[in-house]
Image: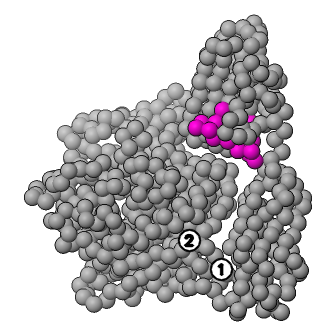
Amino acid sequence: MFQKFLLSLTVLLLCVMTASAQHRNCAAEEVLQQQLLNNPAMRQEIERIEEHARKFAEMSNDRAVVTIPVVVHVVWYNNTQNISDAEIQSQIDVLNADFRRTNADANNTPAAFQGVAADCEINFCMATQDPSGNATNGIQRRQTTVNGFSTNDNVKFFSTGGLDAWDRNKYLNIWVCNLSGGLLGYAQFPGGPANTDGVVCDYAYFGTINSTPPFNKGRTATHEVGHWLNCYHIWGDDGVSCNGTDNVGDTPNQADENYGCPTFPQISCSNGPNGDMFMNYMDYTDDACMNLFTAGQKTRMQSLFSAGGAREALASSPGCQPPNNNNCNAPTGLNATNITQTSATCNWAAVTGATTYTLEWKKNSDPNWTVVAGINGTSHNLNGLVAGTLYDFRVKADCNGNPSNYSSTAQFTTASNCSDQYEPNNTNGTAKDVPINTAFTAQIASATDKDYYRFGNTSSQKNIKVELTTLPLDYDLKLYRGTTLVGTSENGGTQDELIILNNATVSTNYKAYVYGYNGAWSNTQCYTFKASRRSTAWRTDGSDVDDLGEEIPVEVVFENAGFGLFPNPATDQVIVDVPMEREGNVSVAILDPSGKVALSQQKTLDKGESQFTFQLSNLPNGVYFVQVRNGELAHTRKLVIQH
């Protein structure tokens, strides 16, 4: 359940997993405050949507089964993030089961809540027709140079490394990508901007194939699509005050979110004997413990598709209807062969009645297609390609002047131009000498491939730094002096690896060991290796220092997309810790739940300074929001005051 002021804005819902505790978490209130500050005019639209939902709930017969076309935009940095069609279909299957109450675990709903558990009468289908009327499988793919998106919506725009939204009046847009900071996903409520409308999910928690426990049953998308369909958290985002509401009458009032898999009944806010509805999809329990929406939540969803509803147009979308191809079928069976660093052959199956074909191709990272028309056969050679690059291609047939729609898009990756000049170097004893202070590329080209590189330091240049960058997969790094292990870097995923040894023992026999975690490898993508040494010490945080030992200036950094706040809950005093890398003007404000400034400070912080102290004795108990601003950059966090 949520406080009344939550109705005043279309918000993004951000769901986060705390890795150490494996808990689902949501920063809806913080994002809400940010959006209120950025665009207060959105207040009127969400209030209109809420009023429409209230009026709809008073009607008795205006219900219909709705089918929503879905487009899934897969934005991937490495092969692990490029989830399969089967993984995507498994998620669509979960959405259909959860929203139609055909989920296999529906019987786990306690008897006390079975009477309000609802078939929401909402279906989901992969789009078969794109916004231009062409055939599609409902999946877009793009390899990006961005390894980790956040809630700034960059994943929703081609210009910032993502993919543009399809018409929100015809499709539910779902973006699947690598979300940084442990994010599971986030969603936009109805009434927000058209070009950011939809749901974002982390690739590791999407669908039921290869997904990560305890969020491996597709319920992250169910939860986020619930927000997209105007359902709020059932506890009200009001701390533990028991004063919130989700504007749904059949979800019991509860004090706060539930995690893991509680035992029924879980009583709070005097809601016994049945207690919290912790198995509701809009709580925070693990995937295996979620199993229902209620009739009241269904009413809110269905109101969106009624006359005047915010998502009314979706009910008549043609997105799941096969396109009219005038009896000239689109080609199928697309594949690429004879792939080299600079060329490839695109192939497709013959179409009955076709006289010629038109091929379109492009780099996956480019927005525009190159067109090759009038092809007489069922293949075409492409030349002048770039090594180690992902390409898209699609084909349409022409049946005596009657063209088909384009086929679904196929992809291929050209061979890498990594020379792997130091192979074979699979063992410590076969380590190859490499130049110092020089970056080069190489590959982990198979599951058994390992790379050892040898270099040395001197008495005048004892300080060593070894770097792995541009990692295509989860590669790790170890450093040996002879056979003695002296350093290890094993970051998760494709995060860069770094080992620093300042004032290291002088030796000509340092050996860097590069390997794929759990056998990760790629024979098409390179990593970059660099071993450096010098007389002055390296900073152990990995940032650089020039030869005179002076630090290179960097911009102000808000670490972990925020700032320190302690204690929280607070009694009479709170300290706001703003990480600073150089001098800058910073303002900090404490806002009450309505967004009104209760306390504020502004000052210039020098590098190394970071703290603001606020006395809270004159503020009543409750939930507040702390906002930190530095120029155009602003972040907000929740603060609870309990005297």
> Quick one: quadrant of the C terminus?
top left
Callout 1: SS: loop
- Amino acid at the residue labelled 1: Ala
User: In x, y percent, where is residue 512?
Assistant: 70, 23
Q: Which mark is residue 222?
A: none
User: In x, y percent, where is residue 599?
Assistant: 34, 45
Callout 2: SS: strand
**10 Å neighbourhood of mark 2: few (<14), some, or many (≥20)?**
many
- Left or right position of 18 against 518: left
Q: In terms of sequence position, does the residue under pointer 1 or pointer 2 come before the other?
A: 2
Do the CB atoms of the residues marked 1 and 2 lie less than 8 Å apart?
A: no
- Amino acid at the residue labelled 2: Val
Name the residue that disc number 1 marks: 135
- Picture residue at 43% right of the left edge, 60% below the top: 218
Label count reads 2
- Picture residue at 85% right of the left edge, 87% below the top: 355
The image quarter in which residue 132 lies: bottom right
Vertical placement of 165 versus 35: above or below?
below
Residue 538 visible to the viewer: no
Q: CA distance from mark 1 to mark 2?
A: 12 Å
- Front position in the image: 513 or 243: 513
- Picture residue at 40% right of the left edge, 38% below the top: 20
**10 Å neighbourhood of mark 1: few (<14), some, or many (≥20)?**
many
Q: Magenta stretch?
A: 515-528
Name the residue that disc number 2 marks: 71
> Quick one: quadrant of the N terminus?
bottom left
User: In x, y percent, where is residue 69?
Assistant: 51, 77
- Left or right position of 538 against 361: left
Q: Nearer the viewer, mark 1 or mark 2?
A: 1
Q: Is residue 520 magenta?
A: yes
- Picture residue at 49% right of the left edge, 29% below the top: 609
